Image: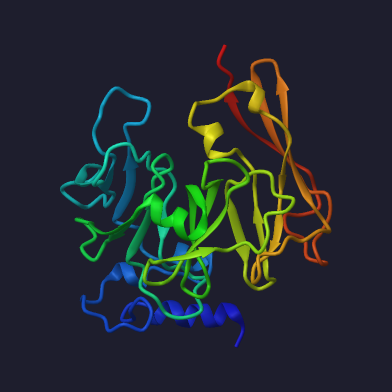
Amino acid sequence: MHRREYLASVAAAAGPMLLGARTRTAPERDEDLRIFASPAKARESPSEKLAYIVALYAGTEIRKPDYLATVDVDPGSATYSQVVHRLKMPNVGDELHHFGWNACASCHDPRARRFLIIPGLASGRIHVVDTVDPRRPRMHKVIESKDVVGKAKLTGPHTVHCLADGRIMISMLGDENGDAPGGFLLLDDQFEVAGSWAASHEGMRYNYDFWYQPRYNVMVSSEWASLNTVRPGFKLEDVGAASLPIQQLLDGSEVDEGVMHRRLVARGDVVLLLIEHRDVVGGITIIGTKTYAKPFRWRLAR
């Protein structure tokens, strides 16, 4: 069976299935069925009725826990465009950032899209939130930074993606001391720390975002900064050249040929980030054959 056909069949069966092999204890929910084999399939489906947004107090004088806001986005609802629930984190100072689901169309086995994985960039904590009641999510588990450091020697959780085998991968900005290059953390399907993913960090200077293509056993990650660089705030002297490491997805080893680079160019008070594709990897074109010059830009402090 072609992988896309397989994923479509997986998506159709995802609702009544459990995370892993456990017996399902909650009633089947429409939300569990919202795992699609392709963007085209997603566009054919009804619109989402709820949105989850993190709200944080980082950089303010307010000493309160960050929270996850549930927003009603159903135009036919009486509470449309309103925050209908707030789930406060157990601690102050997390600085919630990127977050993701425990399951997606990349999973080989049927899994319910039920748990949100929400890291705290500053605290290093990883929050697992249960959305069995979609309008009123509840805290399922908190993984403390010391537990991650103890098993993986990593800090600064940033980007969350589910993997094809049901595990969770999180890009980490720092080592146990907050210094570069960081690495990639693995959680198992019970949300226990499984350890560090990469076979080696050789040639990797920083870490940031990532995505993978399981068909070709390739993962592309980008570079940003170490945790210790991020915490004090932006400094111009920290701006420099970066690269896009390309790694083998199955074993975490780096692909040597066909490196793609990311360049930062300062022009007056604007910094442009240019994505440049220099070659292909193993005969597979990762981005395309043209140079991408659509800039990501931010104002420099004067």
Residue found farthest to the top? 302
For the point 49% across and 74% down, which residue is it? 107
Residue 246 or residue 111, whichever sits in front: 246
Q: As displayed, is residue 13 above or below residue 301?
A: below
Image coordinates of residue 196 in percent, x first then y, are 55, 61
Image coordinates of residue 145 in percent, x first then y, are 40, 50
Render colour scheme:
rainbow
Q: As displayed, is residue 48 above or below residue 175?
A: below
> Quarter of the image holding residue 235?
top right
Residue 281 or residue 290, whichever sits in front: 281
> Quarter of the image holding residue 27?
bottom left
What quarter of the picture does the C terminus occupy? top right
Image coordinates of residue 43 in percent, x first then y, are 46, 62
Q: As displayed, is residue 274 above or below residue 37?
A: above
* Mark count: 0
Residue 113 or residue 291, whichever sits in front: 113
For the point 50% across and 26% down, which residue is it? 233
190 with respect to 161 (left or right): left
Image coordinates of residue 84 in percent, x first then y, are 19, 47
For the point 78% across and 44% down, which residue is it? 291
Residue 147 or residue 42, whichever sits in front: 147
What quarter of the picture does the N terminus occupy? bottom right
